Image: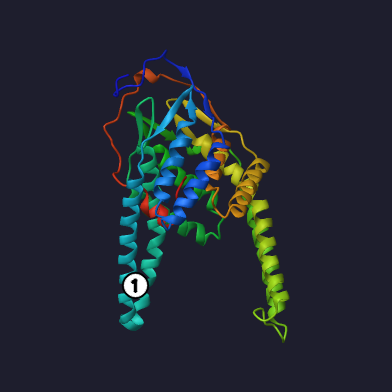
């Protein structure tokens, strides 16, 4: 098959996406990665992450043809070194500013606020790297557009979410998803993201439930804490019972907030999926709040009781959960799709890894 073109097929081929990972096969990989991470003081994680991705991609099939992941551990490691260097420069600048006396805050505050935009930059760069290292039938994906522009957009939308006390968050999530998918290409064909289609999924009802549930729960925990703090002999450090009550209340609040947020998380995932289009193909995600809840619960239990060793299994489990619930409606003329000349970045998503934002 020539590298420049997807193998010819009848025009208008229906699409069928399947994730066929055997989760049991990730147990050995999880143990291997965990032990090597311990022996190398976590430096092996870049090569371990690469192996996990290769396995997940190789077990994901579109019309019985597997995807390919061509990323390398060294690329992720180089990205990590670049991010580490930038972090050291940032810390040195902050340290130096301390000697400016009362004027220090005028410079430090903008630096820390600027980190919000840097997070957006990191997300876009990570998505670009993953896209460039993904191929199907020899044809690569790639992400055009500017990571810096996305960072500025991310910064503005985060400020909007803050000044609206979170009520703009559904709007923010959709607007942040738009450039990620609208700038994605498969070969010389582009994806599109329709905000009109995405808005057909009701997310504000579930969001209101999450928002009010969070506010009520936080108020209850704050009231409990203030009531304890007003006691004349209040000393959480010296009274294990009081400390246990505080931690129990915080844990209960976290669990209840997670519970009331599940309908919104499921609705937003369905909304973003509805907005994705490719050559007339529409995407649907068949997912409900209860299913998302079981996924989260299972993943948390696997991570906690394995002390993080089973993270590769969690990643494979999550990928299979999402991909097997995606429905692709429409047909594509694969014979008309050609390879793109875009090769993608040379290093991995170092900043995203530093912020803990790695997609998988």
Mark 1 sits on what residue?
94
Residue at 30 percent of width and 43 percent of height: 345
Of residues 138 and 278, which is closer to you in this image? 138
Of residues 12 and 323, which is closer to you in this image? 323
Say whether residue 314 is left or right of residue 243: left
Numbered circles on residues, count: 1
Which quadrant, please, contains the N terminus? top left
Quarter of the rendering containing residue 248: bottom right
Q: Percent from the top left, x then y, of residue 34?
A: 49, 51
> In this view of the protein, can residue 203 be seen by the observer?
no
Spot the residue most to the top. Answer: 10
* Vertical comparison of 354 with 233: above or below: above
The figure's colour scheme reads rainbow
Of residues 311 and 326, which is closer to you in this image? 311
> In this view of the protein, can residue 285 be seen by the observer?
yes
Residue at 54 percent of width and 49 percent of height: 170
Q: Percent from the top left, x then y, of residue 226?
A: 68, 76
* Vertical comparison of 3 with 297: above or below: above
Spot the residue most to the bottom. Answer: 232
Say whether residue 159 is left or right of residue 150: right
Q: Secondary structure at mark 1?
A: helix
Q: Percent from the top left, x then y, of residue 274?
A: 53, 35
Of residues 358 and 281, which is closer to you in this image? 358
């Amino acid at each position: 098959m020539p590298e420049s073109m997807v193998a010819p097929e009848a025009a208008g081929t229906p699409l069928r996406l399947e994730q066929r990972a055997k989760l049991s096969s990730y147990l050995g990989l999880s143990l291997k990665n965990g032990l090597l991470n311990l022996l190398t003081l976590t430096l092996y994680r870049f090569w371990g992450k690469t192996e996990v991705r290769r396995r997940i991609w190789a077990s994901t099939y579109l019309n019985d043809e597997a995807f390919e992941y061509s990323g390398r551990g060294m690329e992720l490691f180089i990205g990590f070194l670049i991010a580490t260097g930038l972090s050291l420069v940032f810390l040195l600048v902050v340290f130096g500013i301390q000697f400016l006396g009362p004027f220090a805050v005028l410079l430090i505050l903008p630096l820390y606020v600027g980190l919000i935009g840097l997070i957006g930059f990191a997300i876009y760069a990570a998505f670009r790297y993953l896209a460039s290292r993904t191929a199907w039938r020899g044809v690569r994906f790639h992400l055009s557009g500017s990571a810096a522009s996305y960072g500025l957009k991310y910064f503005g939308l985060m400020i909007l979410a803050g000044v609206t006390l979170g009520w703009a968050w559904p709007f923010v999530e959709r607007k942040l998803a738009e450039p990620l998918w609208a700038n994605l290409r498969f070969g010389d064909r582009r994806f599109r993201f329709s905000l009109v289609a995405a808005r057909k999924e009701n997310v504000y009802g579930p969001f209101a439930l999450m928002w009010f549930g969070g506010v009520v729960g936080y108020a209850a925990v704050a009231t409990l804490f203030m009531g304890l703090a007003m006691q004349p002999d209040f000393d959480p450090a010296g009274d294990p019972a009081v400390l246990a009550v505080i931690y129990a209340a915080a844990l209960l609040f976290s669990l209840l907030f997670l519970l009331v947020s599940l309908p919104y998380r499921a609705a937003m995932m369905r909304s973003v999926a509805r907005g994705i289009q490719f050559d007339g193909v529409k995407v649907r995600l068949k997912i409900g709040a209860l299913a998302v809840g079981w996924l989260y619960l299972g993943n948390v239990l696997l991570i906690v009781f394995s002390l993080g060793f089973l993270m590769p299994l969690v990643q494979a489990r999550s990928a299979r959960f999402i991909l097997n619930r995606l429905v692709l409606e429409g047909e594509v003329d694969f014979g008309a799709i050609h390879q793109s000349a875009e090769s993608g970045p040379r290093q991995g998503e170092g900043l995203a890894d530093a912020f803990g934002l790695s997609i998988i």
